[in-house]
Image (cartoon, grey):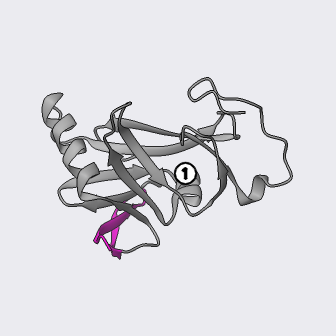
Amino acid sequence: MIWGIVMVLTEQQFAEVTADDSVLNVTPAAVSIIKGLLEQRNIPNHALRVFVTGGGCSGLQYGMAFQEAPEAGDTVVNSDGIRLLMDPTSLMYLRGASIDYVDSLIGGGFQIDNPNAVSSCGCGHSFKSDDQQGEQAQQGCGTCGSY
């Protein structure tokens, strides 16, 4: 289990609570890569925004981007010296997920293990949530070639 601190940004203040598996977990491997990227890009005070957006072959896809400061309504997860930002909608889909970094011979990258996904694309960048069960997903993925 990985612990951290969660802060919910309101319009005027942060509310601090202890993070647990119900928010978002980050493995030591992912923390190390994120710290390295922040250092390499010379943006040590930025946070990593983790978000979910429509698209991909399964209907929803993951995204990540560095951002200097949280926005109103964001949840901020502090874990081992890094900050992760999530908007309320993304948090709904990512609650309880785990971010890892996997390095393999055919390519590495961040991998999200999401308990809220009922199915996912072969590449792992796109998923379908429980509330999309009845919807018809697009076929195929430009990233992994799965059908």
Depth order, front residue of 134/95: 134
- Looking at the picture, how far across and down is residue 5, in whole percent? 29, 69
Residue 59 lies, with reference to residue 84, above or below; the image says: above
Depth order, front residue of 143/25: 143
> Main SS of the magenta segment?
strand
Q: Is residue 72 visible?
A: no
Q: For the point 66% across and 33% down, which residue is it?
A: 146
- Looking at the picture, how far across and down is residue 121, in whole percent? 63, 41
Whether residue 2 appears in magenta in the rendering, the answer is yes
Q: Quadrant of the C terminus?
A: top right
| Quarter residue 145 falls in | top right
Q: For the point 78% across and 39% down, which residue is it?
A: 137
Whether residue 102 appears in magenta in the rendering, the answer is no
- Looking at the picture, how far across and down is residue 16, in whole percent? 32, 72
Residue 118 lies, with reference to residue 105, above or below; the image says: below
Task: Judge from the rendering whether residue 136 lies leftward or rightward of residue 120; answer left or right.
Answer: right
Point out the stretch of residues depicted in magenta.
1-19
Where is mark 1, residue-wise?
A: 90
